[in-house]
Amino acid sequence: MKSLFIESCQSFLRYHDIPGDKVPIVFIHGIGCASSSDYPAVAAQLVSQGHRCILVDLLGAGFSDHPAGFSYSVEAHAQVLAELVDAIHLSGFVIFGHSAGGAVATVFASLCVDKVEKLILAEPNLDPGGGFFSCSIAEQSLSEYLRQGHQQKIQDSAASGNDIWAGTMQVAHPIAVHRLACSLVAGSVPTWRTLLFQLSKPRLVLFGEYSLPDPDTERLPQSGVDVSIIPQAGHSMMWDNPVAVAQTIERFMMPG
C-alpha cells in the first residue's frame, strides 16, 4: 500500500497502485466501503490483462486517515483525488466509481477532464436525495449517529448477511460516513447527472441484474451514456460477480 500526504488537511490518503503497462484505472468506492476491500478481485482480472489499477481508500475510509476538519463531501473527496493523480503524474486514465463513489468519480472526472479517457460508473448516485443507506444515515443527527446509529448499521448489516459492508463500516470513521451521506442527500448544483451528461468522454454505467428494473437503463442511453448489465449481481456487483465486472470494463476500454 502507498500513501500521499494531503497538505490541505494534514492527513494521509492511502491506496494500492498495482503496476501494468496498459491504461490505468482509478477505482473509487461507495459510502462506508473501501477500495482495498471492494476491488481486489476485479483488479486481479484487469492486471492479468496488463492494466495498472489504483485502488483508493477515500479519507475517512479503509486505511486512509480521518481528519477532523475535512468536510467529507462528494466535492471534497473529488478534489483530493485530483491532488493524487497530480502527485503521481497520472494521465490518460479511466475512472471507475461505485454508488456514492459514482458521484465522486463524476466530479473527479470534471476536475481532470484533460487527463481522463473514459468514465465508468456502477449504480451511481446522480441526483439529490441520496440512496437507501445514505438517506437512513443522513436522517439522523450527527450526535445520534455517533451515539448509536453507526454501530446499529454495522449490527444490522451483519445480521442481514451483508458482512462485507459490516466489516468496512467497522473501520470507516462515523463522522466521515455521516458527512458523506448528508452530501449525497443534499446533492449539488449542477447535479452530478448534469456533469455526467456534459462530460465529453466515453461513459458507461453498470447495473446489476438483480437491481432491475431501473429507469436509467433507458434514460441514460438517450443522453449518450452507454449502459451494461452485470449478470448474477446486485448493487454490490464487484462482490457478486467480479469477473463479469472486469470483463465489461475491459471491453469498454478497448479502442474503437
Image (cartoon, rainbow, N blue to C red):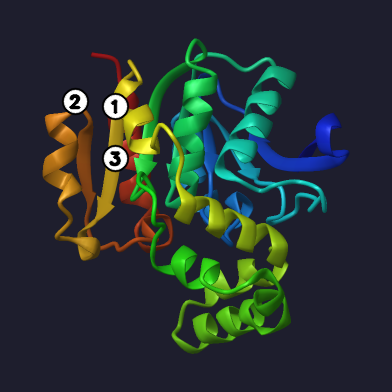
Image mark for residue 117: none
Q: Is residue 202 left or right of residue 190?
A: left
Q: Secondary structure at mark 1?
A: helix
Disc number placed over residue 205 in the picture, else none: 3
Q: Is residue 191 above or below residue 136?
A: above
Residue 150, horizontal then vertical, whole percent: 64, 76
Label 2 packing within 10 angstroms: few (<14), some (14-19), many (20+): some
**Mark 2 belongs to which amino acid?**
Gly
In the rendered image, is residue 150 in sight?
Answer: yes
Residue beneath the point at 18% across and 55% down: 214
The numbered mark, 2 or 3, whose residue comes first in the sequence reads: 3
Q: Calculate the distance from the C-alpha at mark 1 to the C-alpha at mark 3.
A: 12 Å
The residue identified by callout 1 is 197
Hey, what amino acid is under mark 3?
Val
**Residue at x 22%, y 65% (from the top left corner):** 210
Tell me the amino acid under the disc marked 1.
Phe
Q: Which residue is mark 2?
A: 224
